[in-house]
Image (spheres, grey):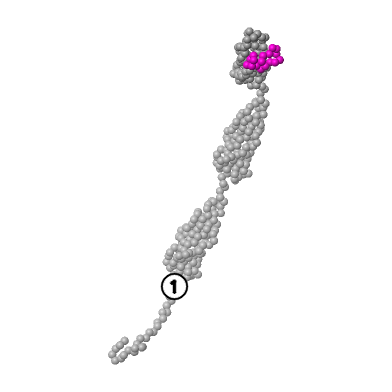
Amino acid sequence: VSGNGYTVSSTNGTATVAVSDDDDPPPSVPVVSITAGNGVTEGGDATFTVTASPAPAAALSVSVAVAQSGDFAASTATRTVSIPVSGSVTLTIATTNDRTDEPDGSVTATVNTGNGYTVSQINGAATVSVEDDDDPPPATPVVSITGGNGVTEGSAATFTVSANPRPSSPLRVDVSVAAQGSFGVTTGTRTVTVPTGGSVTLSVSTSGDSIDEPNGSVTVSVSSGSGYTVSSTNDTATVAVSDDDDPPPPPSVTISIGDASGEEGLWVTFKVTLSEAVGHQVKVRWESDHAYDLDPYAIAGDEFWYMDGTLTFAPGQTERSASVYLNDDSYAEADELFRVRLSSPQGATIADGEGIMTITDND
């Protein structure tokens, strides 16, 4: 500095002496991170490694939040771990085993902010997968039914009742039995038990008799019930039942046609009769025809018309009639003959199927 009685050197007017600090610098703030161990099965421990870098100079308390996905009874409360001066510590989260089938899940641990450390921006949270080890519940069996071969009355109609998948224990199934025809079938609801093998045979008895009757059938349907569902495509099956009795003998009633006569130029009317009254309808066909074996015979178209038809007898009726037109002429001649024949009976048999018609001359 300038003053009285001296001058300041222009080159060495200032000098500096270095002073060194002999104190240690403050320690760096640790960055805390967390990593996950391998996945576990329910009942095992999920493990995590909590690390401080650099390692703390003294034990470091770190707050960690625990969460879970799924229901594995992991404790999800916030907890505190202490990282020793070695720099890392293992965090163990217990899971609980159960017998309930459920989706797999996980345990996640997240480092919370706290005093004396900062949280890693990259590895601030970690997750350990937790696998469920329980078998899924058995699938609900679908019950179906199929029918056996057709039977003759007196034999049992058989059906197969099946459950898919097979039940783990005997399964009671309700079925409904119906019948068409009169074969002594016990209809209504009954219960069959499907064993663990998956199927059972159901037999439905039929009765034999001596009555001729139409063929019929036995039908079994699976009813809804507990512990199973009913097949949407094979819920009903039918077994045909054949009647084995001979049809009744043909009716004893007979049909007969009578002879008749008529004058030329008019109609000849003949009668057809039944031997007795019956409770069903009877039919028979008739037609006029030549009679060349008779003498003298008439010729269709000249002396009489060719005609035909069907006579129907209502129940209880025993007599019907029909007519054939006789042609007229102007000359004297002997009486002439032709036939009316019966055919195609229904509900009776023909006893006398030919009637002799006489044409009387009017000249």
Total labels: the figure holds 1
Judged by its main secondary structure, the magenta piece is loop
Residue sitting nearer the eye, 125 or 25: 125
How far from the left and from the top, in percent, is residue 336? 67, 11
Residue drawn at x 63%, y 11% as measured from the top left: 329
Residue drawn at x 66%, y 20% as measured from the top left: 343
Q: Which residues are magenta?
A: 289-305
Q: Residue furthest right?
A: 293
According to the image, label 1 marks what residue? 27
How far from the left and from the top, in percent, is residue 213? 63, 27
Q: Please tell me whether residue 212 belongs to the stretch shown in magenta.
A: no
How far from the left and from the top, in percent, is residue 150? 65, 34
Residue sitting nearer the eye, 130 or 275: 275
Query: Which kind of residue does numbered mark 1 sit on?
Result: Pro
Q: Residue furthest bottom?
A: 5
Residue 275 in view (yes/no): no
Q: Quadrant of residue 114?
A: bottom left
Residue 209 in view (yes/no): yes
